[in-house]
Image (cartoon, rainbow, N blue to C red):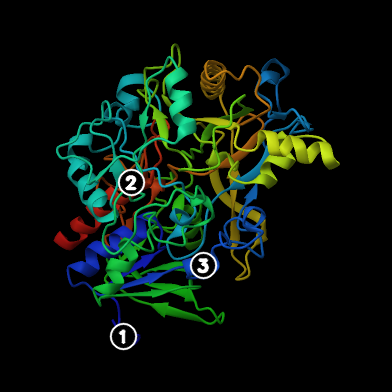
Amino acid sequence: MTASTAPEVLVIGSGAGGAAAAWVLASRGVKVLVLEAGPRFIPRYDYPQTQADWESRGFPDTPQSPRYTFAPLQQLDRQFSHLLSRSSLHGALDAGGRRRAGDYQHVRGVGGSTLHYSGEAHRLHPQAMRMHSRFGVAADWPLDYAELEPYYQKVERLVGVAGPQQQGARWRSVAFPQPAHALSYCSQRVTAASSLNWQPNSLAILSQAHDGRPACNYCAACNSGCPRGDKGSADVTFMRAAENSGNCRVEPRSSALKLVAGDNDRIDHVLVADPTGDVREVRAKAVIVACGALETPRLLLNSQLGNESGQVGRNFMETLYWQVLGLHADKLGSHRGLPVDAICWDFNAPDAIPGVPGGMTLSIATPQSRMAGPVSYATRLVGGWGRAHKQAMRERFGHAVGISSVGECLPNEGSFIDLDDAQTDTHGLPLPRIHSHLDATALQRLEFMRARCHQVLAEAGIETPLEETGSYDQFNSTHVFGTCRMGEDAQQSVVDRWGRSHRWRNLYIADASVFPSSGGGEAPSLTIQALAVRTAEQLLRA
């Protein structure tokens, strides 16, 4: 599509949902324009793995100004002091009496947050889509697993997802397109000692060469960006295929400022800021918003549009997590492999945790715990100074074991997104403000997650964690959900079962903001992509 050609569909955001939707439309001959507020990274040059300071640099996404703000977070309760994040070297990691505002680990760039994710590619547990019917919490999905299953297949084929033959309740009509990755030596040792059930994780990381991309080399640095293209981030999969069709144009560093209403309950145009700061009008027959569960409600609220139900920004769900680290007596080479190669689904069903609705996963996640290099060992696990410290580093490097748990997060009245009434961006628009509250069920779930992480570490022969961190005393979210939920009832949801606005006939949403529930610890990218493919195919039929 040439620069002068008006798009038929405008997609705002090039992450998991926006890229998947653009691929479907462009491959069917539709002229698509994708707006991306961030840059286009060049993997082989922009990612730091070949540089001496790779470990301290991390992913090259460095915002120059705030992207969001926090309302005051909740006071901490002494009865939950065992849930405080702590380190054997540094003591308590939160010195105050109030929950600390940390990070929402979102990336602006062509490919979105898939650029630095660990590649986990999970289908939702079928029962997790009926949380309200079964437990009276969250909301039911307006579709079921069987309806979503064919779309999961399409996404897994394009991306090249590697996984085991069976994955518990997540029934499959066809096998994974790629064989599962072998577990690292560290994960083999931990799983062999565990009384729980473990299997290779399902990953959007190639175990065999596919579509011009090589198989993984197990450098364990996925979270810094993959310079080789074996990780199936949206830029090298959906976005590449969309652009190769000749029907899709991507404009990096271009921000959608406002959706402008027209006649007949349709979006007339979108105000867009170019990289130079100039603002122009972009018109299209349909608009797909895929900015994520913070920026999507922000765009709608700043546009004063799409919130007829009052639900935009409500029902905010974050990542509920717990993570423990310890040092094993044996050298396990745990800095090598995949960030999260083994997973336990034993407690993933929404009724698997006694006395509290909502499930959780466990994973062996040593590299994802940022223990793939010596800097993390020296600053987080191995104390001392001078010659003694050097000797301790030689003796302990490669001995770290990290166990991570991610749990269900349920919506509550204290968790939502609104507009900050004081802070704005460079265009003068209010920033999104995060209100986050962990209710009693979240704390019960966290206690269970912590206990299971300790159990796995102890069974591996590590009695005392040297570091543990969790959601109780700090907001640190890799995924957020729910702020424009889908549903049949227009008074209780923002979009319908296809992702289309209940009122605005040419407005669609294709990101995790449409999730009615978060799932029991599943990574959401595969479900975002499956929903986006389904939404785009419905748009073609409209």
Residue at 56% over, 32% down: 402
Crowd around label 1: few <14 · some 14–19 · many ≥20 (10 Å): few
Q: From the image, tell me which residue sits under label 3.
A: 38
Q: Mark 2 vs mark 1: which is more N-terminal?
A: 1
Q: Which amino acid does label 2 sit on?
A: Leu
Secondary structure of the residue carrying numbered label 1: loop
Quarter of the image where the C terminus is located: bottom left
Q: Position of residue 391 (x, y in %)?
A: 76, 37
Secondary structure of the residue carrying numbered label 2: helix
Q: From the image, tell me which residue sits under label 2.
A: 526
Q: Position of residue 50 (x, y in %)?
A: 57, 62
Question: Residue 2, which numbered label?
Answer: 1
Residue at 45% over, 16% down: 356
276 is higher (above) or lower (below) than 155: below
Q: Where is residue 89 in the image (x, y as percent from the top left)?
A: 77, 32
Q: Which amino acid does label 1 sit on?
A: Thr
From mark 1 to mark 3, how far is it between C-alphas?
A: 21 Å
Q: Which amino acid does label 3 sit on?
A: Gly
Q: Position of residue 347 (x, y in %)?
A: 40, 21
Q: Are marks 1 and 3 in contact (CB under 8 Å)?
A: no
